[in-house]
């Protein structure tokens, strides 16, 4: 077995997908390797979020195949994909605003029994200390950065092997964006979680990424090392606004 086959946890082959009759991705190939952070970048409307939603079963797949650890998952319902230890964190509406932090964590742990939840909670609070501090506070009163931390904690409590992040730093200040990205890096380093990260904060994201895919107009334009993309004057200026 090749090294690539051993390391790849997600493989997307010749994917055509979208929403009903709205075709967004055209013949896309993609892979994410185990225990790495794979960054997905590109201009607005390039299909970045659609890629994540396709992996998580939230899009119409017209043709092509998505496999997870060698098993086909394209065509499965989102709840079946979630049970395979895959977590998807959308950009908005990723917490229950009217519930407290602890209630949010309890809602997220639907695959655990009460003993498992009690056992997992201290580790969650150790990883996200701010959540312990505001344990009884409703999520609606949290800052944008704190909400992202809660969304991450809600995914982490189920012990995922793969986490899909859709622009987690959107609308955050540079300082909070750095904190969120640092925490995402921690999830990889401390827990060995594979990360697929869609981001608009290109330079910040590429600092923590192991590999990067660039999309434009629903098609792949570049894949490789983050430093190679930043050093490519034509691609970085044309598609990313980096000069």
Image (spheres, rainbow, N blue to C red):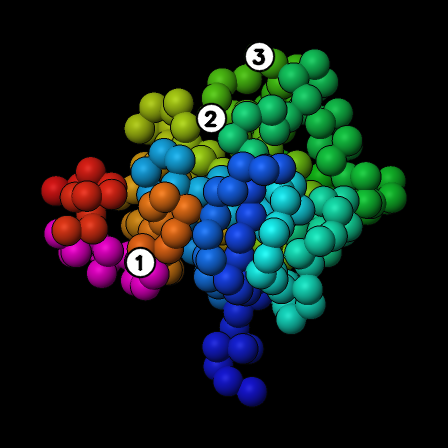
Q: Is residue 226 magenta?
A: yes
Q: Position of residue 96 (x, y in %)?
A: 68, 22
Residue 178 visible? The answer is no
Name the residue nearer the viewer: 113 or 213.
Answer: 213
111 on left or right of 219: right
> In front: 196, or 189?
196
Q: Which numbered marker is on residue 141?
A: 3
Residue of label 2? 145
Asked whether residue 172 is drawn in magenta, I would say no
> Where does the image place residue 138, in percent across and percent down from the top left?
66, 15
Give yes or no for contact between labels 2 and 3 (Cβ–Cβ under 8 Å). Answer: no
Q: Earlier in the sequence, mark 2 or mark 1?
A: 2
Q: Measuring from the top left, give residue 63's x and y in whole percent.
A: 59, 57
Tell me the magenta residue range. Answer: 222-233
Q: Residue furthest front?
A: 21
The residue identified by callout 1 is: 222
SS for tag 2? helix
Q: For the point 60% across and 62% down, which residue is it?
A: 65
For the residues labelled 2 and 3, the Cα–Cα distance comes to 12 Å
């Amino acid at each position: 077995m090749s090294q690539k086959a051993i390391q790849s946890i997600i493989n997307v082959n010749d994917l055509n997908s979208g929403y009903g009759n709205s075709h967004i991705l055209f013949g896309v190939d993609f892979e994410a390797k185990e225990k790495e952070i794979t960054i997905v970048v590109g201009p607005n409307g390039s299909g970045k979020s659609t890629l994540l939603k396709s992996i998580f079963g939230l899009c119409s797949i017209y043709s092509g195949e998505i496999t997870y650890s060698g098993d086909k998952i394209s065509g499965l319902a989102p709840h079946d994909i979630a049970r395979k230890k895959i977590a998807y964190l959308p950009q908005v509406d990723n917490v229950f605003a009217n519930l407290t932090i602890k209630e949010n964590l309890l809602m997220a742990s639907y695959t655990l029994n009460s003993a498992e939840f009690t056992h997992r909670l201290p580790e969650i609070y150790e990883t996200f200390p701010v959540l312990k501090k505001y344990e009884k506070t409703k999520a609606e009163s949290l800052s944008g950065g704190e909400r992202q931390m809660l969304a991450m904690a809600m995914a982490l409590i189920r012990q995922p092997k793969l986490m899909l992040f859709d622009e987690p730093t959107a609308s955050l200040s540079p300082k909070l964006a750095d904190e969120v990205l640092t925490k995402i890096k921690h999830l990889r380093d401390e827990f060995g979680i594979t990360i697929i990260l869609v981001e608009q904060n290109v330079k910040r994201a590429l600092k923590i990424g192991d590999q990067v895919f660039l999309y434009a107009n629903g098609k792949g334009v570049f894949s490789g090392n983050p430093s190679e993309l930043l050093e490519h004057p034509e691609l970085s200026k044309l598609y990313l606004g980096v000069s």
